[in-house]
Amino acid sequence: MKLRNALLVATTFAAPAVAVAQPVTGPYISLGAGGNYIQDQNLKDVNIPGVGLNSYGTSNNGHIRVDANVLGSAAIGYGLGNGFRIELQGDYSKNTLTSLDSLNAGGREEQYKGFVNVLYDFDLSPFGLPLAPYAGVGAGYDQVHFQNGRASGYVSDPTSATGVDTVFIRSTNTQGNFAAQGILGVAYNVTAIPGLALTLEGRVSALPENQSYHGQFFAPNVATRINFRTDYTINYEGVAGIRYALFSPPPPVAPQPAAQTPPPAPVTQARTYLVFFDWDRADLTARARQIVAEAASASTHVQTTQIEVNGYTDLSGTAAYNQRLSVRRAQSVESELVRDGVNRSEISIHGFGESNPLVQTARGVREPQNRRVEIILK
């Protein structure tokens, strides 16, 4: 008993930390900003009619390099309450081209991405930690836009005795295809504002398909169209943001006043039977049926004027859902009592939801002793 009381006291003091680590339930929105770095892209199958590109200082298997730059992100999603979330995410990123092999480069590479993500929040509340790490994967579409992409420089001229000349390559194109991503992040819920969380996450997204582009190539005595492809594009992203659950449950409240509890037993001594339930269930286990049968039998051997059947839940889930679940549990016990020979007119049922727990816990804790129906013979 001393150990149990000590645990209850510890749970009470740890409640604020435990409460902020619960998984998301219901719809939410999120916004974020951060940085984006694109891994060097391979240049493939360059085609300049009548001219070999390697004659001008680069090759059919060159590299396009860009610098790191900014990223914006937004998402809407839905938390299932069991740790899993599904969301729609949209991103915009902008990077500056810096080089094409030995040539200097300029212009922008912009990306517009949309993903459907499946994520899982890891519940650390049993450890009293205020953080909720999460991981996920996504699939969607990545549209790449070269805005005035260009490269220029002095290279060897195969047609000139001097051996040095200037080339210029320019391209403004848009291509897109299937993309995928992996996500690792962590959330910290702000206790002062229920539903609000600060997030920090890293992403790796990939555009695996080859992308085809075209542009113009200029050199002395040469002005022609150029066609080329890039192979897979890999992005490394770091994003800091906020997430807000639209219909988050209210913060834990103090136990209700005694006036709101079930009325006290009459002068005659009442006999109480407890029937326990599995999490989020209202059907009776084999042991529960035995207890109901004992209560039904006792009601015929002692002077009984009333049989109260009161349903309760633990503090996981929303208050509205718990109220309905407590009624279903009381109805299951009532039906079993009738099958065991009790007159239905002698039974009154009540659903008290998550109020009056046997064991005081923080919100979201799945306490078996609180998932019960009390059969009171008066």
Image (cartoon, helix red, strand yellow):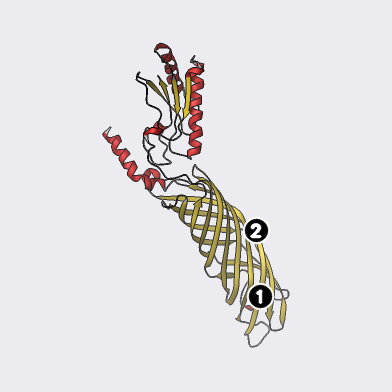
**According to the image, label 1 marks what residue?**
170
Classify residue 138 as left or right of residue 369: right
Relative depth, front residue between 49 and 125: 125
Please report the residue visible at 49 percent of the width from the left and 46 percent of the height from the top: 248
Residue 270: quadrant of the picture: top left
Q: Amino acid at mark 2?
A: Asn
Residue 105: quadrant of the picture: bottom right
Question: Residue 80, how many percent across, how many down?
Answer: 53, 43
- Outermost residue on the left side: it is 2
Classify residue 6 as left or right of residue 343: left
Question: Which corner quadrant holds the N terminus?
Answer: top left
Question: Residue 296, how many percent across, how many down?
Answer: 44, 16
Please report the residue visible at 51 percent of the width from the left and 29 percent of the height from the top: 328
Relative depth, front residue between 302 and 86: 302
Above-or-below relation of 213 to 104: above
- SS for callout 2: strand
Question: Residue 213, how many percent across, how many down?
Answer: 68, 67
Above-or-below relation of 18 to 204: above
**According to the image, label 2 marks what residue?**
177
**Residue 166 seen in this snapshot:** yes
Mark 1 → mark 2, Cα distance in angstroms: 23 Å
Residue 227 has which mark?
Answer: none
Please report the residue visible at 44 percent of the width from the left and 19 percent of the height from the top: 306
